[in-house]
Image (cartoon, rainbow, N blue to C red):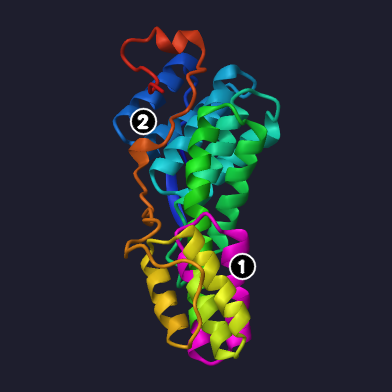
Amino acid sequence: MALAGCAGGKKKPRLAYEERPVELLYNTGANRMDRGQWAQAVNYFQEVERQHPYSEWSRRSILMQAFAHYQANDYPEAIADAERFIQLYPGNAAAAYAHYIKAICYFEQIVDVGRDQAATGQALAALREIVQRYPNTEYASDARLKIDMVNDQLAGKEMTIGRWYLRNGDTLAAIGRFRTVVDRYQTTSHTPEALYRLSESYLTLGLTEEATRNGAVLGHNYPGDVWYSDAYKLLTSRGLRPAVEPAGSRRGFLRVPFRKDKSQTVRPPATAPAAAASDASAQAPAT
């Protein structure tokens, strides 16, 4: 009799139990992955675990399930698979990949700056863990690029809140948000605007020395940025003058949009048992 699992209120059909060679189960699952049949691939890899729980094939199948769930946009299941592998095999060389797929799942759940950024914080923590644990791997190289994007997202959230405070007359609260961007996210694309907003906010409070100082920092680091041109005009209109003349009107940085292109994600490491590679009818996916 076919077995059925239940997840999220929906029945998920599973393979009918029939004892089969582990090589056949594993390679059929790999073949389904190559075809993009993610749910079927998961079924076969789960069957490998069920029928051959203490084998190298079983260990490898957990990672393959994580990747298949990720490709199907089933992020909670992919994260659960990755965490299960980390708990069971923390010292295994493939644990680096489990950490990576977990971080990517959080990364792809990041939403626009106008909404809650819980996934953004989780993504940043997971990406940093990869860089710290596995600094010389391809996973760390990809994580470093994504950390920059995540920081830009978090800075954008601070700017959104800061602007709202400024529009509503809560200048001190706005200054706190803009200062966070300058102090914590100073390499992001939002820093020039944050410095401009600080000058603007301090002028509102009558703190001309602080306003001029932030304008000077903006001019020194971003002399050709349009935000500095605006700051220069604002300060000189009040009889103040930062130290640097504006050098033009261009942006200091260009924001990098989030791209969720799964084809660019690093695939599971090629550590399947040798017998899998010898089956010409169903090869495991290449790295």
The amino acid beneath tag 2 is Met
- Is residue 57 positioned above or below 186 on the image? above
Which of 83 and 244 lies nearest the eye of the viewer? 244
Q: How far from the left and from the top, in percent, is residue 48? A: 52, 25
Q: Which residue is mark 2?
A: 33
- SS assignment at label 1: helix
The amino acid beneath tag 1 is Thr
Q: Nearer the viewer, mark 1 or mark 2?
A: 1
- Is residue 168 positioned above or below 113 on the image? below
Mark yes or no: residue 116 visible.
Answer: no
Q: How far from the left and from the top, in percent, is residue 142? A: 48, 37
Q: Is 167 contained in the magenta span? A: yes
Q: Residues within 10 Å of mark 2 (few under 14, many from 20)?
A: many
Q: Which mark is residue 213?
A: none
Q: How many marks?
A: 2
Q: Residues within 10 Å of mark 1 (few under 14, many from 20)?
A: some
Q: Residue at x 62, y 60 (%)?
A: 184
Q: CA–CA distance between discs 1 and 2?
A: 44 Å
Quadrant showing the C terminus: top left
Which of 34 and 146 lies nearest the eye of the viewer? 146
Say whether marks 1 and 2 touch (CB < 8 Å): no
Q: Is 74 contained in the magenta span? A: no
- SS assignment at label 2: helix
Which of 272 and 190 lies nearest the eye of the viewer? 190
Q: Main secondary structure of the magenta part?
A: helix
Q: Residue at x 50, y 49 (%)?
A: 148
Which of 219 and 121 lies nearest the eye of the viewer? 219
Q: Earlier in the sequence, mark 1 or mark 2?
A: 2
Which segment is the magenta one?
164-193
- Is residue 74 positioned above or below 152 on the image? above
Q: Which residue is mark 1?
A: 180
